[in-house]
Image (cartoon, grey):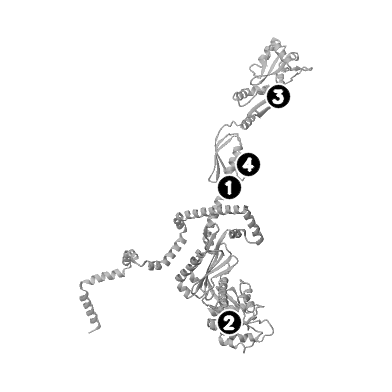
Amino acid sequence: MTQMDDHHQIDELREILNGANSSELAALKERIDNVESRTRDVAEVLAPAISKTDSDALVSSLKDPVSSSLKYAIRSEPEDYAEILYPVMAPAIRRAISQAIASLMVTINKTVESATSVSGIRTRIQSFRTGIPYAELALRQSLLYRVEHVYLIDRESGMQVSEVTSEQVEGLDGDAVSAMFSAIQSFVQDSFSRDRSAMLTDLKVGDHNVWVAHGPTLMLACVIQGNAPEALKGDLYDALYKIRTDYANEIASFDGNVERFEGVESYMHPLLQLRLKEGAEVKVGDDGEKTAKRRWPLVVAALIALGFIYVWFMQSSKISTVEYYLRQTPGIAATDVYWSDDRLVVEGLKDPDAKIPYGSFQAYGIQPEVLDFRTIPFRSLEVDMELQRFRNELTLPAGVYLSVRAEKIYLYGEAPITWLTENDARIRQLAADGRLTISALSASFESVSDVLRANFSERDLRTIRMSSAARTDATIVQIGGSLSPKNLTFISALFAGNRWVSVIANKAEVDTRNADGSLIQENADGSLNQENVEDPSS
Amino acid sequence: MLKKKICMVGDFSVGKTSLTQKFVNNVFSEKYLTTIGVKIDTAFINDTKLIVWDVAGRDSLSPINASYLVGANGIVLVCDGTRQSTVRDIKDIWQVVKERIGEVPTVVALNKADLEDWHIDAEQTAYFEEQGWQTFETSAKEGQNVKALFEALVSEIG
């Protein structure tokens, strides 16, 4: 038989054996070969498969790819992850900052308290004398005990496996110290003890104690300042027992590679205890490097917080400055001062004549362009504002003055009759409103004389007398004398309607005034003069 | 970080301490040598931290305190090139070391190479070659071969 016949027969035999199942086999083969259908199959069973898998094995196998994926994702989209984490991180940061500030306040209070007490001063002197920092001395005085260092040491070689140091304590070369512990142990054992199994468990130097817990291959030594309770020895042995249990393999094959003991510090940190005399115990664990690493986000957050506090303080300070100077400024009533979009907004009332004290603001670094006055105009009746307004409005002639006494504004002096006539309505209105007192304001004799001179001969002028007379609202000039009816009529017509001048027909009345010394005396040259005119400003 | 314990041993006054001082960070004062018979310092060779035990010298009254050798990863045998007896004594010292901690990587320092009355020749150091120890003529005073000595030992420790 040829080879071809053989193949043919085998195919026939296969057909007979598979029979009707041959199409199912083909479908199965197709399903296995087709990547898409295989992916679909896996997707179907993936979730139930994961739930039935040994969780430890699954975690172990997913650890690296998930970790790498997370790192990649965070690196490529940091903003998104920051946003996701913000609700978790922000309250934690806030809490940490508030705790740090609270702690800082307590420290400051304690420091101020201790610095001002007799013992505090004594401690400062001791610090100056010995060169030991004040904080360290103060701590020692209030300290019952403090575990400063904890060393995990390989007993055979004296090599340090791990070390943790209290953060307030200066670090030593732990390897050298550990080796020296071991050397001292050997020395004491060789020199004084015949029992090779006897161990050095306590050392005391000054106010420092060294307690050592011994295991078969490791020893745990802690350096204590002060008098620690015996219970600490129990803690020491407990920690050593846990380390022996959890690092049994690493201990058995220790060759000087301390990196294999990663995480062992977590067993030693609880031993770094500190107890103050008051009885409050504080755990102050962690070596300096780790503490520093863990604290740097807090430091950054604290710096940011301080930055905000500084900005807030400066802005508040500027608000106070603006409020203060506006209170001193007549014609401005600020109801609110606040920051909005980097501008200092002032709300309230402002008299159009009021002057904003920009000079004072600039002296405190507040530039005019920063200020935004959102004020409603109003008429201020403050005396200073009124005074300024009257000066601008009335344009005072020489001999007329404005002054303030007892919160009242006085307009006084001798004014030209023309000026009085022009401003009469306004002045009397202000007086009627009580804004101005004009009882000592009068027309000047000279200006009245000028009017008379222009209308009368020298002869007639000699017959005319002038005097001043106080009225309830103002002082007027009285004109009288031995006037002829014609002149009297003319003068009356000349000053008709003028409330600052009064013409008196009755000679006797003028004479009476003449008798009491308030009259104008005629000079030899015919000019007119006055005497005893009151000065309201005096 | 890898740490290794190194012990410096040799006769009294061969210059072990001077040799060590050229190389290490001083941690403790020398008085420990006379009180407990050892002084410990540390030094770095690349990424390896050496904890150097400077063991007090042997003399007729006080043998080496072999307890200090326990756990050593390497030994520096030090002798004085101007005193042949210190070279001969190395054999005895090595016996003490071997009995206590077994065979460990070892190098030899023929110290005081800066002095003129040098009395060492190849015949006297043949034993070192037999043992397969690298030998260095060192001078603590001038720093000659000091670093090379420790580097060779670290290399041997591996």
Q: Amino acid at mark 3?
A: Asp
- Alpha-carbon distance for marks 1 and 2? 70 Å
Question: What residue does disc 3 label?
Answer: A535
Q: Residue furthest right?
A: A524
Q: Amino acid at mark 2?
A: Val
Q: Secondary structure at mark 3?
A: loop
Q: Residues within 10 Å of mark 4 (few under 14, many from 20)?
A: few
Question: What residue does disc 4 label?
Answer: A360
On whether disc 3 and disc 2 are found on a single subunit, the reply is no
For residue A376, side relative to residue B116 (left or right): left
| Residue A411 position in % (x across, y down) | 66, 26
Question: What residue does disc 2 label?
Answer: B107
- Work out whether residue A263 can be spotted: no
- Alpha-carbon distance for marks 4 and 1? 17 Å
Mark 4 touches mark 2? (CB < 8 Å): no
* Residue A392 found in image quarter: top right
Mark 1 touches mark 3? (CB < 8 Å): no
**Residue ID at (60%, 66%):** A206
- Alpha-carbon distance for marks 3 and 4? 39 Å
On whether disc 1 and disc 2 are found on a single subunit, the reply is no
Numbered badge on residue A163: none
Quarter holding the N terminus of chain A is bottom left
Q: Which mark's residue is nearer the viewer, 4 or 2?
A: 2
Q: Amino acid at mark 1?
A: Met
Q: Amino acid at mark 4?
A: Ser
Q: Secondary structure at mark 1?
A: helix
Question: What residue does disc 1 label?
Answer: A314
